[in-house]
Image (cartoon, rainbow, N blue to C red):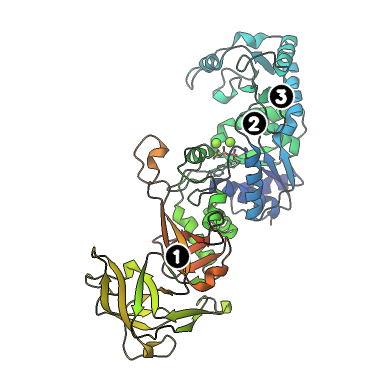
């Protein structure tokens, strides 16, 4: 719907279409394969893929692989997997490295037009010569080289006759430009490095600011959407396009990147967390990567809804990470089966319940979605409850179990605590209770009321399970110089407990709501034939308001 101007980018596109600048919209998502995608990338993916779809246009997935040092096939594969998992299909799949010949051609064309020259100065000297915001730059002696000299030297660069850093190719623009990016930027450098795609064919590689506009032009991209830090590079982007001999007019549009509370969104930093073993890989459920979020239990829909709701703006801001959590709760509320689990178990013996007997109680699978039907849960003389649901010496207004108090067991009966069994060190190891058969759930019993309702799991048929409970990986009070100073040492708690026996069939990535504990996902990596491992996605409630 071209009338939709809900974000400023659509406004620009609509104008371009009405002026007739383009017949078809072409966008691209251009990740560098030097890490796994994170939730910030998701914002760009949702924007680019959904714009292309809305305008019946095209979207290219383009690997911006012009820096051989950091790139790897593992990252290429993970990026494709993550985009597909989000539910998007690209129109074309491209590698910037396949354009190296064309980029080299375009550089030669610039040299011939006297718009580029080979530089002998070191990186440091180039920086010194470049000047400052208040001072114009100084022209390098190499700037006056003839076309012939430049062509010969550039070819030697290509043929490997120089060492890394010995020469670079610079665009010849304006050493006095108020925009420092235009003071003869470097557009090619020497790097004797094997490239993941082109092997040892090349030892010179184009710089991002030269390569990116050419990539867009080669692919016929009409709207090249990037983050705000590239705003000052736009004049250079336009210069490269204009002076190339490719007939295309891609337009760079900048938008504000996603920043999230308690989260680092930078592949470099995330890689450091992985390499230095602060986490268990790129897909650690604490990571803000797409693969980490997937393993944690986030759904594609929750991530996409979040990305749509935060919107697209021109000014930087900081989004509360609890907003992302809000959308996974919303997504799972009606679809995740509800079930009971005990994370820190303590045994309860119901002394007046017949020994050896098991009865099967009826429980709804999701009270908010009756279509999900009913399940059966066993009840017997021995059950587990949560350690924190019992106190020997409770404070006032404690409505859970304590000696002499009666509580309701969800879907079952009222029980009353009579005896506390302790070990030699005085630790509570077992509780002895009695139940009242008249109080059975669903029987319509109204004889008396209790204030606490506890979850529980029957002991003899319970399924053992491991639970991984997460806190923010990054702490919020930012005092210190390095982000590693904010890594939360208590971001993971592992407990062993029990789930209902029907959970034996749970498969990796199945999602559940555990009564009182939150939403959980069956971990696809740690779960084995013998042990179910659950990741807590989020707790049930949050003080966050949308
Ligand atoms: P990082 O700084 O994490 O390495 P990047 O921008 O260097 O990210 P690229 O692989 O170059 O990573 O990014 C691909 C696309 O994703 C770019 O168009 C970039 O603008 C976009 N992108 C990256 N991070 C964010 C973010 N936090 N919010 C929105 N878009 C982002
Ligand atoms: Mg980058
Ligand atoms: Mg970056």
What separation in Å lies between label 2 and label 1 (alpha carbons)?
48 Å
Q: In the rendered view, would you say 28 is above or below 443?
A: above
Between 356 and 251, the one lying in front of the other is: 356
Residue that mark 2 sits on: 237
Q: Are marks 2 and 1 in contact (CB under 8 Å)?
A: no
| Relative height, residue 124 to residue 352 (above, below) | above
Label 1 – label 3 distance at C-alpha: 53 Å
Q: How many marks?
A: 3
Closer to the observer: label 2 or label 1? 1
Between the residue at mark 3 and the residue at mark 2, the CA separation in whole angstroms equals: 24 Å
Which is nearer the N-term, disc 1 or disc 3? 3
Query: Between disc 3 and disc 2, whose residue precedes?
Result: 3
**Element type where label 2 sits in the image:** helix
Which residue position is annotated with label 3? 202
Residue 383 picture location, percent across and down: 39, 75
- Relative to 324, is 484 on the left or the right? left
Q: Position of residue 443 (x, y in %)?
A: 43, 90
Q: Look at the numbered discs 1 and 3 and tell me whether their residues touch, using CB distance below 8 Å.
A: no
Instruction: State the residue at coordinates (43%, 83%).
Output: 356
Question: Tag 1 or tag 2, which sits nearer the N-term?
Answer: 2
Residue at 50% from the left image edge and 46% from the top image edge: 280
Residue where numbered disc 1 is placed: 518
């Amino acid at each position: 719907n071209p009338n939709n101007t809900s974000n400023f980018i659509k406004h620009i596109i609509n104008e371009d279409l009405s002026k007739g600048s383009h017949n078809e919209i072409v966008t691209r998502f251009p990740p560098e394969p030097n890490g796994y995608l994170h939730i910030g990338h998701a914002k760009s993916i949702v924007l680019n893929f959904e714009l292309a779809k809305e305008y019946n246009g095209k979207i290219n997935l383009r690997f911006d692989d012009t820096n051989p040092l950091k790139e790897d096939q593992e990252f290429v594969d993970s990026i494709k997997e993550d985009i597909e998992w989000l539910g998007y299909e690209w129109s074309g799949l491209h590698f910037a490295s396949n354009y190296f010949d064309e980029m080299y051609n375009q550089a030669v064309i610039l040299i011939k037009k006297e718009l580029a020259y080979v530089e002998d100065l070191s990186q440091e000297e180039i920086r010194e010569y470049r000047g400052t915001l208040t001072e114009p730059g100084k022209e390098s002696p190499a700037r006056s080289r003839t076309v012939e000299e430049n062509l010969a030297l550039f070819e030697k660069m290509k043929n490997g006759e120089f060492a890394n850093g010995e020469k670079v190719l610079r665009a010849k623009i304006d050493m006095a430009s108020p925009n420092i990016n235009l003071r003869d930027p470097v557009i090619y450098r020497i790097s004797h490095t094997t490239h993941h795609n082109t092997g040892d064919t090349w030892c010179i590689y184009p710089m991002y600011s030269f390569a990116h506009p050419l990539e867009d032009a080669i692919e016929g991209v009409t709207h090249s959407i990037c983050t705000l830090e590239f705003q000052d590079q736009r004049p250079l982007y336009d210069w490269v396009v204009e002076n190339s001999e490719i007939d295309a007019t891609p337009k760079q549009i900048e938008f504000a990147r996603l920043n999230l509370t308690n989260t680092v969104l930078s592949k470099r930093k995330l890689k450091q967390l992985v390499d230095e073993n602060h986490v268990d890989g790129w897909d650690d459920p604490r990571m803000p990567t797409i693969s980490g979020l997937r393993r944690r239990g986030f759904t594609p829909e929750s991530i996409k809804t979040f990305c749509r709701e935060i919107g697209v703006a021109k000014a930087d801001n900081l989004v509360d990470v609890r907003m992302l959590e809000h959308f996974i709760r919303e997504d799972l509320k009606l679809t995740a089966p509800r079930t009971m689990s005990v994370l820190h178990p303590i045994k309860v013996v119901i002394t007046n319940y017949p020994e050896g007997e098991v009865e099967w109680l009826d429980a709804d699978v999701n009270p908010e979605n009756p279509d999900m039907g009913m399940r059966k849960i066993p009840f017997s003389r021995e059950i587990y409850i949560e350690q924190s649901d019992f106190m020997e010496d409770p404070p006032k207004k404690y409505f859970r179990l304590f000696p002499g108090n009666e509580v309701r067991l969800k879907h079952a009966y009222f029980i009353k605590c009579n005896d506390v069994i302790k070990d030699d060190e005085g630790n509570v190891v077992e509780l002895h209770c009695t139940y009242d058969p008249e109080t059975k759930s669903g029987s319509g019993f109204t004889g008396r009321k209790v204030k606490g309702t506890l979850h529980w799991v029957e002991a003899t048929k319970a399924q053992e399970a491991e639970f991984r409970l997460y806190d923010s990986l990054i702490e919020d009070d930012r005092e210190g110089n390095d982000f590693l100073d904010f890594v939360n040492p208590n971001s993971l708690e592992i407990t062993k407990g029990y789930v209902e026996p029907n959970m034996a069939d749970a498969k990796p990535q199945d999602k559940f709501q555990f009564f009182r504990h939150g939403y959980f996902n069956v971990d696809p990596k740690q779960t084995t034939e013998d042990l179910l491992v659950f990741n807590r996605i989020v707790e049930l409630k949050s003080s966050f308001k949308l």
